[in-house]
Amino acid sequence: MKTRGVHLQYRFESLGQSGAQIENPLFELLSALQQAGSISHAAAQLGQSYRHVWGSLKHWEEVLGSELVVWAKGQPARLTPFAERLVWAERQARARMRPHVEALRAELSRVFALADDAALQLLEVFASHDLGLPRLQQMAESQHGLHLSLRFAGSQEALRCLMAGRCSVAGFHVPRGAGRHSVFARELRPLLRPGLHKLMGSHTRCQGLMLGPALAQHRAAEGLDGPALLRALAAGQYRYVNRQPGSGTRLLLQHLLAEQGLGTAGIRGFDTQVEDTHVAVAAAVAAGKAELGLGVQAAAHEFGLAFVPLAEEEYYLVCLKAALDTPALLSLRQALASPAWASCLQGLPGYRPQQAGEVLSLKRALPWWRYGPRAATSKR
């Protein structure tokens, strides 16, 4: 078998792309053949000639050193087991890398925009992974002349980057009702300071358990609710795919378990199966790598997974008080407050705008900041 390598490149065209779309002629060809069952139908689907598709297929078989299609007289063409594995692996990689591809495209757009228009407003944003923010990024640039250089990180890392001056805006999330004794109070309180930081409302989203097909059937047959699934998870009954350390979703799992007097020590996969995004967690569950994972409803919907809601979260953006009234931050607040932001969220199940663009009191938005540090510590 031939040695294979991956070569990445990008190009300039008159029409740009958005999100994490990546073109690859091999996988476009294989997907079309998988769906169409013949070269002629695949060629029509791709808008190419039969001869071109046939030649491309033979070219890729030569490059990869392996057959890609099984031919049987009177039967539809089908992918070889190798080609099926190749398509599956590429889809998994795309799901896992989607936020990073979005960030790369945004960064390239930013630097080329600077070269073309020095008046373009720019904001460096480090934020906990969220499916709505890339939509905000596109809308802010097209309608408000504001480019958000968006990089995804865990909630804690994003706030630390803001404190260190590595970004102008950080994004984090907390579940409604998290009190002063919660893991969120303990982990996020040192990173947020009244008088120094200013919160901006953005949206709410629903988080819950995303279930693989077998577990979804078992849950329906047994009538298991969210707390019952969490108890079984803590007892080691299911394989779990977790989020990375420092992420708000990882904190959310600890918070939900603590509410029931449970811990993480017995969870299978808690430290060994880890992904950086909601989409990657959903892809891992859909691929059978785990029975369940915690994530946003929109990610479960994207991968056709059963979803058990557990918490509604507030997603906030935060900046330094001194930067609040700068032109770029004013443009961001206008974008968030616009009807266009609400429209952006309509296609994401479990999402809705919440006090979008409003400057919020940190102590009022986060109840655990209403108490002095000494009082909160002494009552734990």
Image: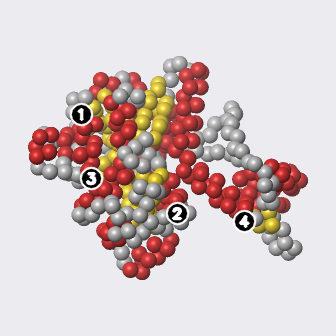
Task: Give residue 193's mark.
Answer: 1
Badge 1: how crowded within 10 Å, few (<14), some, or many (20+)? some
Query: Are the residues flagged by discs 4 and 2 in contact, CB closer than 8 Å?
Result: no
Q: Earlier in the sequence, mark 4 or mark 2?
A: 4
Q: Nearer the viewer, mark 3 or mark 1?
A: 1
What amino acid does circle 3 point to? Arg
Q: Secondary structure at mark 1?
A: loop
- Label 4: which residue? 81
Badge 3: how crowded within 10 Å, few (<14), some, or many (20+)? some
Q: CA distance from mark 4 to mark 2?
A: 19 Å
Q: Quadrant of residue 58?
A: bottom right
Residue 73 drawn above or below residue 89:
below
Residue 367 drawn above or below residue 10:
below
Residue 175 drawn above or below residue 107:
below
Return the residue found at the far top.
Answer: 118
Q: CA distance from mark 2 to mark 3?
A: 30 Å
Q: CA distance from mark 1 to mark 2?
A: 40 Å
Residue 24 image offset from top left, x and y in percent: 71, 47
Q: Secondary structure at mark 2?
A: loop
